[in-house]
Amino acid sequence: MSEPTNDAPMEDQPMKDQPVNAEPVNAEPMPPTASEATSSTATPRAPAPETDAVLRATRVTMRFGGLVANRDVDFDIPRRSIVSLIGPNGAGKTTFFNQLTGMLTPTSGDIVLDGVSIVGRSPHKIVELGIGRTFQNIRLFGEMSVLGNVMVGRHARMKASWVGSLLQLPPVRKEEQATTERARELLHLVGLNPAYEGEWARNLPYGDQRRLEIARALASDPKLLLLDEPTAGMNPGETAEMTRLIGRLRDQLDLSVLLIEHDMKVVMGVSERITVLDYGEKIAEGSPEEIRANPRVIEAYLGKQATAS
Amino acid sequence: MGAYARRATSTGAIFGLAITHLSLVGLVVALNDRELVAGVVSVGSTIAVIAALAAGFVASRPLRKGLAPPAPAVALGSGAIAGLVTGIIITALAWLVEAFTPRDVLINASPQLVAVLHWGQDVMVGNAINVIGGALMGVVGASLRIIPGDLRRGAVTGIGALLGLALMQTFVSQILTGLPLTFVDDFLYEREGLTWPGAITTLVLFGIIGWAWASQRKAFSERLGAMGANQRRTARFSGLGLLLLVLATLPLFVGPFLSQTMDLVGIYIIMGLGLNIVVGFAGLLDLGYVAFYAVGAYATAVLTSPASPAFAPHLDFWIALPLVLAITAAIGLTIGAPVLRLRGDYLAIVTLGFGEIARIVLNSNWMTPYVGGAQGILAVPAPQFLGKDLRDPALLYYPIFVACIIAAIAAISLANSRVGRAWTAMREDESVAEATGVNTIKYKLLAFSMGATFGGLAGAFYAVRIGTVFPQELNIIVSINALALIILGGIGSIPGVIVGAVVLVGLPELLREFSEYRLLLYGIVLVAMMLLRPEGFLPNRSRRAELHEGEGDSEPDWDEKRWERETGTQTPEPEIT
């Protein structure tokens, strides 16, 4: 609020070459219900040339009544990068996520995907524009086959109308065939055993359900993949595998990845850039090393892990 | 042992009280008009025997699900106790009715009932039959549980066939004489009831068929599985073709009443297929489906009948039909649009309201100049085909039959397409479907109008089948019937819709003389289904799994060990090209 630069349009701003905001703002952690009056900062922007950002969020604020879940969050995701969003429980990560996917509409601020603002668009439209997501608590279509789940994920890229489907016209059949093949490829890519494509999604073991969710999200050919705690509830072996998978997806598909994660090993291992939220505000941004060294972050959140590792 | 005895007593009491109830509502006496074996046993008396048998069967199950079955002696003992208790209660009922003759209050507690409960014998003999026979039948019921499953299937099939043939005598003999297999008819039936040789042959023959089917089914499906894909498809198609051929020739020899019944079943199949799209595929609980049926029927009547009060274009049925479908689709959109944001219970209540509104509006003074109010619209002409009037139910059957096939193919095509997947996704989790790229508003509307179109098609045939349309007949019972039949058949399952329609619409028509008890039987059937087979007769795969979660008889849940064994613990990390 207090920084004038934030009021200027994004494009006109000089890029500050200061990756991490080390200035302490509030000595006390701010209670989430506290109003704007106590807030005083917005973090300087990260050093990303704007042409290279696949997604750019500008001063995103989300209010639920008196509760400010996100306050003036500026956020860039460079193309073909893996970016993490971290912060303690209740920091507003998932809220922010939900705004990117259209499940929530920001109270103010703008979110632009490849030059197209997605604010106010419905979730299915945003999927069409190129954002795919997974959910923190796995939400597959449980009573649908594994393959069917991935094929639903492809919905936005299919053209079959109800008339065509009703009459089973040749183009519809061809598309159906192609979709099946693509879905199988994706199952292969995330490492799911093809023998289980006919199994119901709910019968898969936990780790595979996570993989399936990723395959479903990838089926819409997203430019940006949002992963909400992809390793939650996984054992160290599974976590390591998931970490490798995320890296591999970025390398093999032309993909940018945004990760919400609690497991610092994963975050530090896979991300190129990390953004830290606390009480709805961005308190730091930078490379893993910088975040690890940031006293503000250590104080707010990372303390124990940072000193332990 | 004590636990078994206690349970056997209460099971027997429950079945005894059930018979008491059926007796006091008059069903037992009504059933008595049907002879099982001519001049010897009536169906009414048999119901007591069957109750004891069922009590014995139920009482001999393991104490809890998953426990080992009781030792044979314990099972038989339980069965005997249960059957005995049932018999004693029936005896007591007969005695009470005779002693107090409470006919002022319970109109069906008649001397006739006493006679039926006493098997038409003396008091002492009748009581002895009930008590001793009850215990014996209880033992028989329990032994059904002890014998191997294949034999049990055979026994149940035989008894079921016997009862079915006795109850359906009129129609079975009509079909047999129509076929013409008059000699079979003569062998099976006397004027009233089966002949002794007929009864025994039925029992044995169907028993063997049931047993053979049960014991050979596995081998059969294995053989089917061993076939190549092409062969399997050939086998399936030839089976289907044979079935369709039989169905197509049926009206030629079943007589007008059965044809009429089949027409009605066909109309309900179309309706069920439509409602199945809305409820089964898309997961939108619609309790006002009759609205679309009513609109279809009235639109047909207005467009084709010369007696339409205000606007009577007097179109040919086949020209009117596409218009009717378009109108109902539009109505589906109109009703669908305001309720889009509602989910679950709220949607159900609002659609329930729409169903009632449709009837009330058609009946209202406001609409009377256009649709005739309570008098309805008369003289809806029958469809013409090649210059032939299809008024005869046996002829009207054919367009309905074709419409059923088209509706079923349409439903199957939609289910296995992008559209069907979007619906399923929506049913499973609406917000995730949206987040996966499905335009949920569009697909909800599509489901509504698609279901409405099917309902309109059914309504059109309803109008020409009866030749008149009245608002009174288009009431909530139609919605409930349509919903009950898809639940009975298995929600989301297309063969289930067909079975459900036959059982819930066809059978009651055939058992017209018991129509007083129709709703009672409906209730019993639905409660029994919910307890014993909640997924319906022919469930689609996934529902079954959901409802039998954690039970031994469902398909096993995911087996981690199997996964590890077959794939190695480490899932592969393939490269993509």
Image (tube, helix red, strand yellow):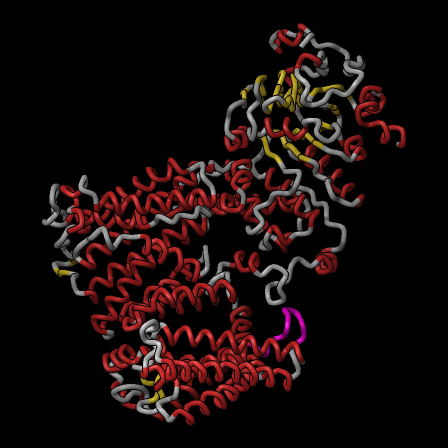
Asked whether A166 or B256 is in front, the reply is B256
Residue that appears at 29% across and 52% down: B475
Asked whether B379 or A110 is in front, the reply is B379
Question: Percent x, y for residue B306?
Answer: 10, 49
Residue A238 at least partly seen: yes
Residue that appears at 26% across and 63% down: B263
To which quarter of the image does residue A137 belong?
A: top right
Q: In this view, does A12 lie to the left or right of A264?
A: left
Question: Percent x, y for residue B516?
Answer: 30, 68
Q: Which segment did they paint magenta?
A: B59-68
Question: Percent x, y for residue A207?
Answer: 70, 47
Q: Is residue B393 left or right of residue A273?
A: left
To which quarter of the image does residue A226 belong?
A: top right
Up the image or down, B383 lies above or below A266; here it is: below
Residue reaching furthest to the left: B306
Most common secondary structure along the magenta stretch: loop
Quadrant of the rendering where the C terminus of chain B is positioned: top right
Q: Is residue B418 left or right of residue A82?
A: left
To which quarter of the image does residue B326 belong?
A: top left
Question: Percent x, y for residue A290?
Answer: 82, 21
Up the image or down, B72 lies above or below A123; here it is: below
Quadrant of the rendering where the N terminus of chain B is positioned: bottom right
